Image (cartoon, rainbow, N blue to C red):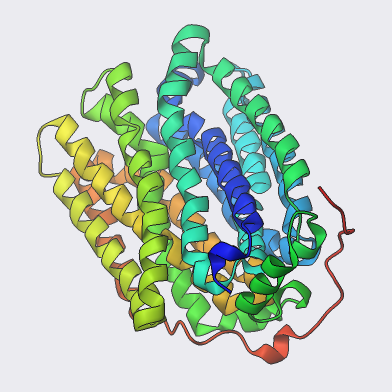
Amino acid sequence: MSASKVGGVRWTLVFWMFVVAAVSYLDRNNISIAAAMIQKDFGLTNLQLGGVFSAFVMGYAFTQPVAGRIADRFGPYRVIAVGIVWWSVLTALTAAVPSGLTFSLTLLMIVRFVLGVGEAVIFPASNRLVATWVPRSERGLANGVIFAGVGIGAGVAPPLITHLMLAHGWRSAFYVTAVVGVAVLAAWLVFVRDRPEHHRSVGAAEAAYIRQGAGHGVAAARPAPWLKIVKDRQVALLTLSYFTYGYVAYIFFTWFFKYLSSVRGLDLKASAIYGMLPFLAMAVCSPLGGWIADRLTPRFGKRIGRCWTAAFALALSAVFVALATQVADARLASLFLAGGAGALYLSQSAYWTLSADIGGGSAGSVSGLMNMGNQLGGVVTASLTPLLADRFGWTASFVFAAVLCLAGALAWLFIDPDAPLSEADLGAAPALKTKPSVV
């Protein structure tokens, strides 16, 4: 039976995961938009501000494998709900940190670190949701749509946060985005469930279609041993490549807005407009990359459809980022950097699709480990970018990012997409610890 005739409840869940991704990036990207005001309010140097950025990413990074394991064990529905509550509270607490105290910087870094810990569950749990709900043939597009939320959330942030800051101060922007998270939580609790059989709106035809296409007996599988996951060659290569991806991506999530205003000389309003471009490119290119991969894979196989597509996208991103350093006009440089961000996100769904395919019942654990590599790239970016810029200039910072992007592209050429974790480690286990419920 064709996909169009079996129903589309699985895409409703993908939509809500898209919304969660958008709000999570709105809540984490607000600090980069408010960076200049926060830096002035707290009297921070560039390196201290980089430390604040790094605090979030470190909490986010080192919690990834644990977050993925928790999602595998207890199910994404409950885990993501807790994550939304967590990050909404900590976003509000960021605005509540007082300036002018001897320990203000330390307190701000602690709050951002704990915020990162709470947000860590989002994408490993999302990957487990995709592995359970979405057949392999549709996972590229599904992951692309989910990660388009990253671009939408981060793209909405510049004009929204700028408007709130100019009207009411930077702290008000954090309170507003925290309230948005609570609203999304209410929708999540109503419309999402861990498994198709727990969702009243899923018909028999769609349930059978999902079971047939998911593979690995994902819903009832127990996670593979950690040692096996860590030693797996494909997981290691994915993690290495995603590290380079994260290094480049986090330039846009941390330093890009400040780069436009402080280095390229755009005023706050112009920076808000041009600061949207990379994230809008991400939003468009993320599902586009997944769609392209889903079309190419049945015809040419996963190596071309997933691996070569991702490698090409990363290489193209490197070219755009390097070219941006060679133009004098700030607006043209913004366009080149937007091209680099869009090309980068053409590869996004490939990481998450292959980690779900390889991991099966360990999809949360595998993607958590992989995403830790991504976030460690972000940790390095937050601190190394201003260090390189101070010593060698901003051109050197972006060229270094382009070189890393090429290394990530090369890693994709050595990944075997048809080498999942051993089925012997993915045998049946007790059901996830959630009670069947209906919408």
Can see residue 82?
yes
Q: Residue at x 32, y 18 (%)?
A: 268
Q: Residue at x 28, y 25 (%)?
A: 261
Residue 254 at what x, y percent from top left? Answer: 41, 39
Q: Is residue 313 left or right of residue 352?
A: left
Comparing 369 with 141, the one in front is 141
Is 57 situated above or below 99?
A: below
The image quadrant where one finds the N terminus is: bottom right
Q: Residue at x 67, y 25 (%)?
A: 179
Residue 265 at what x, y percent from top left? Answer: 21, 23
Residue 306, located in which quarter of the rendered image? bottom left
Q: Is residue 308 left or right of residue 171?
A: left
Q: Residue at x 54, y 37 (%)?
A: 28
Q: Is residue 121 left or right of residue 169?
A: right
Can see residue 65?
no
Of all residues shown, which one is farthest toward the top?
Answer: 167
Of all residues shown, which one is farthest toward the right?
Answer: 435
